[in-house]
Image (tube, grey):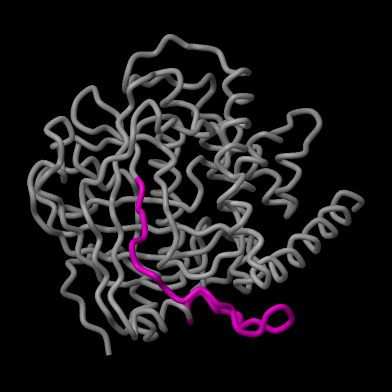
Amino acid sequence: MLLKAIHRMLEMGLHIERRIEPLFGMRQLFDGALREPLAQLIQAQINKRRKDDGLKLAEERLLPDEEKWVQAIIDEMATQMHNHFQPARYERGGNSKTHGLVRAIFTVRDDVPSDMRHGIFSRPRSFPAWVRYSGPGPIVPRDIDDVGFGSMTIKLMGVEGPKLLDDEKNTQDLLCVCTPTFVTPDAKANASLQYWSTREMPIYYFLNPKEPHILDFLMQSLWNETQLNPLGQYYYSCVPYLLGEGQAMQYAFYPRTDVPKTIPGLPFNPADNFLRDNMVKTLNEKDVEFDIMVQVQTDPFRMPIENAAVLWPEKLSPRVPVASLHIPRQKFDSPCQFAFADNLTYNPWHCLPEHRPLGNQSRTRLRLYTTLSQLRLKMNCKLHVEPTGDEVFN
């Protein structure tokens, strides 16, 4: 009870900060002046505590008891879903709140460097896409009460060739979040986070004196902030993927369009779904563009495969533009389209073998996402359907 009381007080402080921060623009000044040097300082401390496992480029290594931690994550997140949702209204266990699902075109550039021309980047072409913007789980709060975390999931369609998962034949999924490093370094730590999340006290994952994750907390805090408009946010893969045989990459989506970023009603009465409202306002007025940037692993220690809390230094390998994402003006907020979004299943293993997910967090996602999506569809009495991009909604 004492832990929960302290956690509630910390939450109240966060909610106050989220309401005040956008009014004065101090966060933008902080980010511009201090975020990068502070991130470098934190990363230096993280790397100082790591040991070199002697892995080669794009090489993986199983964690001790990895399957135990994967099963623990699945069990905890399934419990969270059962605790928070009712049958026929199950949301996803993570990235639960849908801000919007929009149509887009993903176009591969004609100047992709030769060493990056693998898989979907092998030649210039375009793919239709469904792009889902969402907030954190396992609950679906008012936008102002979330933890400042957003995600962007892209489902490309018309992708020919064999896939690592056989439940969809012509798709490739790309998953991104608003922080360049993941909230946990590995699956074992993720199991601990889910333990505390089930007990509705996730802050103690970071502050647990027996196994603290203060540096990870600080790293996440540098990018977790009051979200203003999902269409104007930077997004990062956080975890690596193959880019052809023996080569690993991370990718990111960089916004190119100036979009509305005001929150009417602050600090006392913002709309419950102002992020969706800003998306609607944006796509009523203009098209939106993102650049897709790829970063190739060049140093197996400084750019690890098995530790998702380490930021890959751009000094060692700069991000290179390889494609663009064009989101045209559109209406996307009909109940039918949101119902369609609820039934989509995103999984990084919906992919070509040339882009196989790498690392223990990705191996966890294979079982985790498959199991929890099946649970969600079962509890909602829905069937999985592979989208084509030709869907029409009233």
Based on the picture, tell me whether residue 338 belongs to the magenta stretch. Answer: no
Res 285 quadrant in image: bottom left
Against 394, residue 379 (above or below) is above
Image spot of residue 68 (x, y percent): 55, 29
Residue farthest to the bottom, as pictured: 394
Quadrant location of the C terminus in the rendered image: bottom left
> Horizontally, is 74 left or right of 152 in the view?
right
Numbered disc total: 0
Residue farthest to the right, as pictured: 2
Question: Which residue lies at the image location 35% right of the left edge and 53% below the top edge?
Answer: 253
Question: Which residue lies at the image location 84% right of the left edge and 54% below the top edge?
Answer: 4
User: For this rendering, which residue is in front, 315 or 133?
Assistant: 315
Against 289, residue 58 (above or below) is above
Based on the picture, tell me whether residue 263 belongs to the magenta stretch. Answer: yes
Image spot of residue 73 (x, y percent): 56, 41
Main SS type for the magenta part?
loop
Image spot of residue 10 (x, y percent): 81, 56
> Horizontally, is 333 left or right of 244 in the view?
right
User: For this rendering, which residue is in front, 68 or 97?
Assistant: 97
> Horizontally, is 325 left or right of 49 in the view?
left
User: For this rendering, which residue is in front, 394 or 117?
Assistant: 117
Res 193 quadrant in image: top right
Q: Which residues are magenta?
A: 252-277
Question: Which residue lies at the image location 46% right of the left edge and 76% below the top edge?
Answer: 260
Against 206, residue 159 (above or below) is below
Image spot of residue 132 (x, y percent): 37, 65
> Horizontally, is 165 left or right of 191 in the view?
left
